[in-house]
Image (cartoon, rainbow, N blue to C red):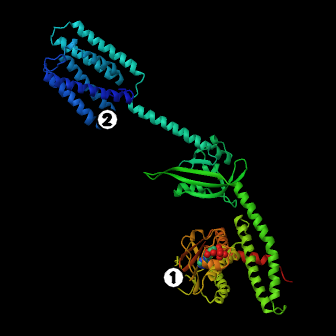
Amino acid sequence: MGTIKFTHERWLNIYRYATTGIQLIFIALNIYSIVNPSARFSIGTTELAPYILALSLVHIIYFTLIFNTVARQSIRLATVIIVCLISISLISIIHATGQMHSYWLIGWGLLCVLSGMFGIYIATGTSLLMAAYVIFLIVSGNYSYVVVEEISVAIATFILCTLSWLIWRKTFVDPDNLVIQELTGKLISKEQQSTILIQAITDGIIVTNTKGKISLMNPAAANLTEWSVNEALGLDAHIVAKLREQDKTEIPESESPFTKVLVNKRAVTETYQLLGREGSTRTVSLAISPVIIDKTDELTGAVAVLRDVSAAYAEEARRADFISTASHEMRTPVAAIEGYLALALNEKISNIDLKARSYLEKAQSSTRHLGKLFQDLLTSAKAEDGRLTSHPGVVEMGTFMEQLSEDLKFSAEKKGLHTEFVIGTAGSTTNATNHSNVRPLYYITVDPDRLREVITNIFDNAVKYTDSGKISLGLTGDARVVQIRMTDTGPGIPADDIPHLFQKFYRVDNSSTRTTGGTGLGLFICRKIVELYKGQIWVESQIGQGSTFFVNFPRMDSVEAIKLQGEQIQKASRTLPTIT
Ligand code: ADP
C-alpha cells in the first residue's frame, strides 16, 4: 500500500459519495426486485441478490459510521475499503444480471476509469478482479457465452485501467504528501513573510542559539554593528554587538546581557553604548529575551532587538545642558538676594520695623525655596547626563551615620519630633546583629558628600511630612549588603504613588504636599546617587502609619576596606601642604 497514490481529496470525496449513491441504487433495485421479480432490471431472481444487498448495506454502514474513524488512522486504507466494496458489489451485480451481456458492465467500465485515480495498484487490482471473474466464468464451464466476449471484456478492463492510470497519474498526490506539501507551502510563505518583515524592520534584530552564536541578523543590525550579515552569522553575539556600559566601562563576557539572558532565562532591557566594527559609537536601547518552548520549558536561544537612541539621548543631553546652565546662572543672583535679605534681617546691621521684617522674612523663605529648586535642577541634570561629581572612598557607615544623625536631629526636634538611631535593629535583614557591645563595622564605597545628600534628603522629607511622632534611623546589613532605614510616623504614601516616587518631578497629590513646598526632584536625585554606587532605594508605606525608606549598598569586605582606608589616609597626608 505504501506506494499507492491518491488524487486530490476533492476527487476522493466525490468518488466516496458517488459509490455510496450507487450502493443505495443497488439496495433500491434489490427491494424493487423482491416486490417485482419479473421486472426488467430485476436481480431478485438470482441467489446472489442477498449478498449484493448485504454488500451494499455494509458499504453504507461503513461509509456513514466507520469511515471517519479509519480515515483518522489512514485515509488510504479507508478509501481502499470503499473501492473494494464497490468493486465486489459491481462484479456480483454483473454476474447476477447477464454476465458479459449485463448492462452493469458500463458501471464496471466507469469504475475502471476511476481506478487509476488511486494509483497503479488499485488500477491493476481492478483489472485483475475482472480477469479473475472471466477465468471463473470460463473455468466454471458456463459456455452459454462466447469465450471471446469474456476475454474482450477482460482486455477492455485492462486497457481502461491502464489508460485511467496514465491519465490520472499526472494529478496524483499522496494525501500525506499533500498535507506535507501544503504545510511546506504555508511554511515557505510564512518564512518569506517573516523574512520580509525582519528585513524591513528598522530596529536591529539578532537571534542567537543557546551558545550565544548568531543564527539570524537583519540588515538594520548589520548597519548598527557595522558587520556584514554573512560574516556575523555563527559568531558570538557579544563579539558582533560590542557593548559598553553607558559610562563606557567594558562589560566582561560573563556579564554580557547575551550571556545573562541565556544563563538566567530572563529578559534584559537596558541602554548601552554599541561600538561598531568600524569605530562608531552609538547609544542603543537593547531588549534581549530568551526563546523558550512553552511545553518543554526548553531554551532554544535568544532574540535581541537593538534600537538606536543616540539622537534621543543627544537631544536629552542638550536639554539637560540647557537646564543645568540656566539653573547655574540663576542660582548666583538668587544667592546674592538671599545674602542681602539675611543682611537686611540682621538686627545688628539693619534697623527695620516689624511689618517690613515680616515681608522680608517671607521673601527670604521664598528665595530659599527658589535657591533649592535651582540647586536640585542642577544636580538632577548632572545626575542624568553622568556629570555628577563623585569622589568615592571607603566609608564606615556606623560612624558616618552616628555623626550625621547628630547633625540631622536638630531640624526634627525644632518641629517637636523625636529621633533615634539604631545599629542592627531587630527584624533587620542582618545576621550580624549586635550580640555583644562590639558593634559590626559596615564598610561601603561611596562619596560621603553624596551619601550625606541622600540621607539628608530622605530625613528632611520625613521631617517635612511628619506632624508628630518619631523618626528612626536604622543601620543593618548582612555579608553582602549594608542597609539604611528611615522610618517616620507621617501620613504614609498611597500604594499607587509608590512606583512613581523616584521619578523626576513626581509629587504625591495630597493636602500635605499642597501645603508643603517641594520640587519633586529630591527622591529622583537620591535614586540617581544611590545607583551611582550600585545601590538600591525603595519605600514601604501604609497610609496613616508612616513610611520607611530603605537604601542598600554593596558591603565591602572589612579587611580590604581597612587596607584601602589606610591607603586613602596616606594619600591624603601626602597631598596636604607642609607647614613650615
Ligand atoms: P518633594 O520636593 O516634593 O519633597 P521628593 O522627590 O523629595 O520631592 O518627594 C516626592 C514626593 O514623595 C513628595 O512630594 C511627597 O509627596 C512624597 N514623600 C516623600 N517622602 C515622604 C514621607 N516621608 N512621607 C510621606 N510622603 C513622602
Q: Which element carries disc 2, helix, strand or loop?
A: helix
**Could you say where residue 360 lies in the image, as x and y percent from the top left?**
78, 85
Which residue in the structure is indicated by mark 1? 426
Considering the image in quadrants, where does the C terminus appear? bottom right
Residue type at tag 2: Ala
Looking at the image, can residue 338 be seen? yes
Which residue in the structure is indicated by mark 2? 71
The answer to which quarter of the image holds residue 357 is: bottom right
Q: Earlier in the sequence, mark 1 or mark 2?
A: 2
Considering the image in quadrants, where does the N terminus appear? top left
Front-lying residue, 225 or 313? 313
**Left or right: residue 56 compared with residue 373:** left
Q: Does residue 248 lie above or below 109 as drawn? A: below
Front-lying residue, 191 or 243? 191
Front-lying residue, 444 or 270? 270
Q: Quadrant of ligand 1?
A: bottom right
Residue type at tag 1: Ala
* Residue at image coords 61%, 88%: 417
